[in-house]
C-alpha cells in the first residue's frame, strides 16, 4: 500500500511539474514572440530567450518533466496558438530545448551551490544555441539546390548563423539565462517546493544522472533532430537531383506522388498505432 | 505626428489586445467553412499541403500553391495578429539572408532561389495556420488524439487555451504593481534610455518570481482536481477514448473540400505545361 501510494504521489508530482513548466514557459515564449526585436546595425537584441524559466525549474524539480513540459509549452502556446506550427521542423526545436534543459537539471545536485547553477545555465544555453545553429546551417545546405554555386550564399549562411548564435549567447545567454537563473534559483529554493507538496532538492535526493547513457541518448536525439529538420526541407534537393535524368514535369510528378504517399502512409501508421494501443 | 503614430501602435499592442486576439482566434471563429470540417480530414490535408511545396521548383507553381493556401487562410478567418506575425517571420528571415548575401558579393541571381525558398516557407506556414488556427482547440485535440498522439499533448492544448487568459491577466497585474511601486528612470538621454531598457527587462524577469509561485499553487490545484476526477485512469482507458472521439464524423462538406483541393493540386501540377502552351 505504502509503495503504491508513494509511486502515485510521484506520478502526480510529475504531472504538476509538467503543467507548471508548460504554462510558464509557454506564456514566456508567447510574450517573446510578440516583442519586436531591436536591431542595431547587424547586432540583433531580441528577447527571444526566456530559457531561464525551464532552467530554474529543472534545477529545482524533476528535470525530465520540466524539459518535456517546456518543450510542449513552446509547441502549444507559441506555435499552435499563433499558427506558427512548422510541421516536422518543430521536432528539432522540441528536442534541442528538452536536451539542454534536461542536462542542466541533472547536472545540478545542489541548487544552493550557485557556481554550479551558473555554469549549468550558461552551458545549457550554449549547447542549445550551438545545436540549433548547426541544424539551421544543414537545413539551408539541403534546401537550396546547387548551394555552392549561388554566389555569396554559403558564406552569408555560415556568417549569419554563426553570428546569430554567438550574439544570442552573449546577449540573451547572459542577460536572459545566466543572471535571471542566478537570481531566481536561490530565492525559489525551499519556497516553491512545499507549494507542490515536495521536499527541496539536496545532494542526497537529487536525480541520479546515468552519464554514459545520457550522453549517448543526447547525441542520438540530436541526430534525430537534425534529420527531422532536414527532412522537412529536403524535398527540393531530391527533385533537383532527379531532374538531371528526367523531365522537370516527371520529377515534380514523382515528388507529388511521394508527398501523397507520405501523407497516406503517415496517416495509416498513426491510425494503426492508435488502434493497437486502444485494443 | 510620429509621436501620435507610435502612441497609436503602442495602444494596439497592449497585453489586453494580444489576449483578445488569441482568444478570438481560438474560439471566435467556429462558424467558418474551415472550422466545420472534420479535424482528421484537415490534418491529412495539412500533411499533403505542408509537404508538397517542398517538392516544387518552379515559381509559377509555387505561386499558385501560395494563392491557394492564402485563400484557405482567408476562409478560416484567422485573427490579424497571427497574420502579422507570420508575415514578419517569413519576410524578415529571407530578407535578412538576401542582404547578407549581397554583402558577400551576391547579385540578382541570388534572388530567385531565395524567392523560391520564401514561397515554400510561406505556403507551408499558411497551410499550418489554416489548420491549427482555423480549428477550435477541442476539435483539434480530439483529431490529434484519433491519430494516436499522446493524450498529454491533447490535454496540453485544451489546458493552454483555458489557462492563457488567466495567466496573461496575472502577468499584467504583476507588471502594473511593479510599475506602481518603482520609478522608471528618465529616458531623455542615450544613457537614460539604456537604463530604462535595463529597468524594463529587470521588471519582466522579477515579475516571473511571484508568477512562478502563484502558478505552482494553481498547477497543484489543477492536478489534484484532475486526480479527483480520475484523470489518469481515464486517459489510459479505451472506453473513455471512444466516447470522446464519437463526435467526429466525415460529411459531404469534407468530400467537397478534398475534391476541390485535389483538383487544384493537379492544376498546379499542370501549370508549367499550360504556360508553355500559351
Image (tube, coloured by chain):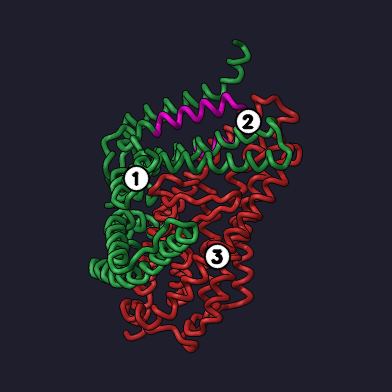
Residue B237 sits in quarter: bottom left
Q: Residue at x 26, y 70 (%)?
A: B221
Q: Is residue B241 visible?
A: no
- Label 3, label 1: how many angstroms apart (C-alpha)? 31 Å
Figure check: B16 above or below B229:
above
- Label 3, label 2: how many angstroms apart (C-alpha)? 38 Å
Stretch in magenta: B50-73
Figure check: B254 above or below B177:
above
Q: Where's residue B212, x and y in %?
A: 35, 70
Which residue is at the far front?
Answer: B189
Chain painted red? A
What residue sits right under mark 2 in the picture? Answer: B57
What residue sits right under mark 1 in the picture? Answer: B7
Residue A60 sits in quarter: bottom left
Q: Residue at x 39, y 78 (%)?
A: A188
Most common SS among magenta residues: helix
Q: Nearer the viewer, mark 3 or mark 1?
A: 1
Amino acid at each position: 500500500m505504502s509503495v503504491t501510494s508513494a509511486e502515485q504521489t510521484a506520478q502526480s508530482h510529475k504531472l504538476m511539474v509538467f503543467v507548471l513548466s508548460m504554462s510558464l514557459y509557454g506564456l514566456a515564449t508567447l510574450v517573446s514572440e510578440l516583442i519586436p526585436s531591436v536591431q542595431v546595425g547587424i547586432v540583433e537584441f531580441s528577447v527571444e530567450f526566456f530559457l531561464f524559466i525551464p532552467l530554474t525549474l529543472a534545477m529545482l524539480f524533476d528535470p525530465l518533466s520540466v524539459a518535456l513540459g517546456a518543450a510542449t509549452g513552446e509547441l502549444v502556446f507559441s506555435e499552435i496558438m499563433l499558427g506558427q506550427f512548422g510541421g516536422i521542423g518543430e521536432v528539432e526545436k522540441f528536442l534541442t530545448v528538452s536536451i539542454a534543459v534536461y542536462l542542466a537539471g541533472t547536472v545540478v545536485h545542489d541548487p544552493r551551490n550557485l557556481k554550479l547553477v551558473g555554469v549549468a545555465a550558461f552551458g545549457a544555453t550554449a549547447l542549445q544555441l550551438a545545436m540549433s545553429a548547426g541544424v539551421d546551417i544543414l537545413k539551408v545546405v539541403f534546401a537550396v539546390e546547387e548551394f555552392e554555386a549561388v554566389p555569396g550564399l554559403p558564406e552569408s549562411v555560415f556568417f549569419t548563423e554563426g553570428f546569430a548564435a554567438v550574439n544570442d549567447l552573449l546577449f540573451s545567454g547572459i542577460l536572459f539565462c545566466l543572471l535571471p537563473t542566478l537570481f531566481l534559483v536561490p530565492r525559489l529554493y525551499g519556497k516553491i517546493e512545499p507549494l507542490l507538496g515536495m521536499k527541496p532538492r539536496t545532494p542526497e535526493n537529487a536525480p541520479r544522472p546515468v552519464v554514459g547513457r545520457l550522453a549517448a541518448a543526447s547525441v542520438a536525439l540530436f541526430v534525430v533532430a537534425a534529420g527531422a529538420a532536414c527532412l522537412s526541407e529536403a524535398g527540393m534537393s531530391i527533385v533537383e537531383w532527379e531532374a538531371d535524368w528526367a523531365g522537370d514535369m516527371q520529377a515534380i510528378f514523382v515528388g507529388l506522388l511521394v508527398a501523397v504517399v507520405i501523407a497516406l502512409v503517415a496517416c495509416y501508421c498513426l491510425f494503426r498505432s492508435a488502434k493497437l494501443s486502444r485494443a | 505626428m510620429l509621436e501620435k503614430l507610435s502612441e497609436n501602435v503602442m495602444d494596439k499592442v497592449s497585453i489586453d489586445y494580444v489576449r483578445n486576439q488569441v482568444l478570438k482566434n481560438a474560439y471566435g471563429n467556429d462558424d467558418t467553412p474551415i472550422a466545420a470540417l472534420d479535424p482528421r480530414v484537415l490534418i491529412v490535408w495539412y500533411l499533403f499541403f505542408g509537404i508538397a511545396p517542398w517538392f516544387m521548383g518552379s515559381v509559377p507553381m509555387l505561386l499558385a500553391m501560395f494563392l491557394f493556401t492564402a485563400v484557405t487562410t482567408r476562409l478560416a478567418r484567422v485573427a490579424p495578429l497571427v497574420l502579422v506575425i507570420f508575415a514578419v517571420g517569413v519576410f524578415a528571415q529571407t530578407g535578412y539572408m538576401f542582404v547578407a548575401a549581397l554583402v558577400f558579393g551576391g547579385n540578382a541571381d541570388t534572388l530567385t532561389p531565395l524567392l523560391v525558398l520564401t514561397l515554400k516557407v510561406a505556403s507551408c506556414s499558411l497551410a499550418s495556420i489554416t489548420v491549427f488556427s482555423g480549428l477550435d482547440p477541442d476539435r483539434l485535440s480530439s483529431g490529434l488524439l484519433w491519430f494516436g498522439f499522446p493524450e498529454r499533448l491533447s490535454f496540453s492544448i485544451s489546458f493552454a487555451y483555458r489557462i492563457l487568459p488567466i495567466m496573461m491577466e496575472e502577468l499584467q497585474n504583476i507588471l502594473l504593481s511593479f510599475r506602481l511601486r518603482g520609478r522608471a528612470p528618465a529616458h531623455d538621454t542615450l544613457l537614460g534610455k539604456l537604463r530604462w531598457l535595463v529597468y524594463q527587462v529587470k521588471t519582466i524577469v522579477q515579475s516571473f518570481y511571484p508568477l512562478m509561485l502563484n502558478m505552482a499553487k494553481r498547477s497543484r490545484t489543477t492536478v489534484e482536481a484532475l486526480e479527483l476526477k480520475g484523470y489518469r485512469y481515464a486517459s489510459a482507458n479505451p472506453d473513455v477514448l471512444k466516447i470522446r472521439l464519437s463526435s467526429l464524423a466525415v460529411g459531404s462538406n469534407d468530400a467537397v473540400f478534398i475534391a476541390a483541393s485535389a483538383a487544384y493540386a493537379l492544376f498546379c501540377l499542370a501549370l508549367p505545361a499550360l504556360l508553355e502552351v500559351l
